[in-house]
Image (cartoon, rainbow, N blue to C red):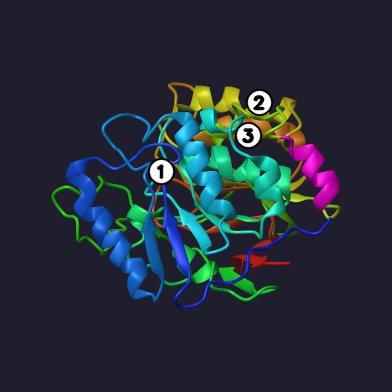
Amino acid sequence: MPIRFPQPLLPGDRIAVTSPSSGVPENLRKRLDVAVRTVEDRGFEVVLGRCMDGSGHVSAPAAERAAELTGMLTDPAVRAVVPPWGGETAIDLLPLLDWDRIRAAEPTWLVGFSDLSTVMTPLTLRTGIATLHGNNLMDTPYEVPEGLLSWLDVVSLPAGGRFAQTPPDRHRVNGWVDYAEFPEVRELVLDGRGTWTRLDGDGGLDVEGRLVGGCVETLCNIAGTPYGDVPAFAREHAPEGLLVYVEASGDDAYTICRNLHGMRLSGFFDAANAVLVGRTAAPDGRSLTQHEAVLDALGPLGVPILADVECGHVPPYLPIVNGALGRVVHTADRRALVQTLA
């Protein structure tokens, strides 16, 4: 069955904001206001949901968060849903979302990364509706480096649109911005150099497949369950095979190694033509680096493994559409991830 892509956003369309995981503390509300204005300046209407409280690790009880997210995804007036950021325990929403109602509705873009992978990836796997793994709302005001796109650019592309992104060869190494002190920050400081790295060997790479993936620390908990059934998705939607992407948020190399082993044993990578691995600032182990952890767990797949892709917690952000047809090229004279919304 074909992937269902939401209609492109047009000026005047409504974008809804809710926190399926963590909300926004009062001392960071000014940054939220800046992020909302950034979206409005692109010509969109922005509405805030009720589930936004940032005083605890979740914005509201699970039933309320699930109901609000379901309502936004099935409201014909809402064309995209984006959270302020991720969090810790969005997994508690999975049995509470109205999957049948979401599946029956006109597709709506769901945007985010980190803990939002817990919801976005199952949404694509279970319904065949494309979702967008990209920078969250609070990061949206940052200037986008040459070669990359903002999530706002991607959701505005026409049906069947094709777009290519290339690595800027720069990333953030030191520190992070305190949004409480600098709510208006828009300059993305990229103080490190480096580009994509092939882990499994040498030689050029030019591979296609349907894109699917997300954050290792969250997806490892649903791999092999009805919410993370990648083999079933591949059989139904990806006869051409998959490009699976994964990224580590903060767990050390030993934990990531265990998690990836478990995901591989569950069949998560069975249909992979290649694996893309996000750049990470997560710590190495005493005897195991993050790159070595990936190779230890995924080397037995016998497919190309390309690391240090800008699809994770180290800025800048390279948006990836779950369900898009992807082509990754990594040769001596070209590096690009091309995605087609078809």
Q: Which residue is drawn at 54% across and 68% down?
A: 154
Distance from the alpha carbon under mark 1 to that under mark 2: 30 Å
Left or right: residue 267 versus residue 258 is right
Earlier sequence position, callout 3 versus callout 2:
2
* Quarter of the view holding residue 334: bottom right
Badge 2 amino acid: His
Marks 3/1 in contact by CB < 8 Å: the verdict is no
Q: Where is residue 117 in the image (x, y as percent from the top left)?
A: 54, 42
Viewer-proximal residue among 192 and 255:
255
Principal secondary structure, stretch drawn in magenta: helix
Identify the residue under disc 1. 19
Identify the residue under disc 2. 261
Viewer-proximal residue among 317 and 25:
25
Label 2: how many residues lie within 10 Å, few (<14), some (14-19) or many (20+)? some
Distance from the alpha carbon under mark 3 to that under mark 1: 35 Å
Marks 3/2 in contact by CB < 8 Å: the verdict is no
Tell how many labels: 3
Region rendered in magenta: 229-237
Magenta stretch encompasses residue 4 = no
Identify the residue under disc 3. 295
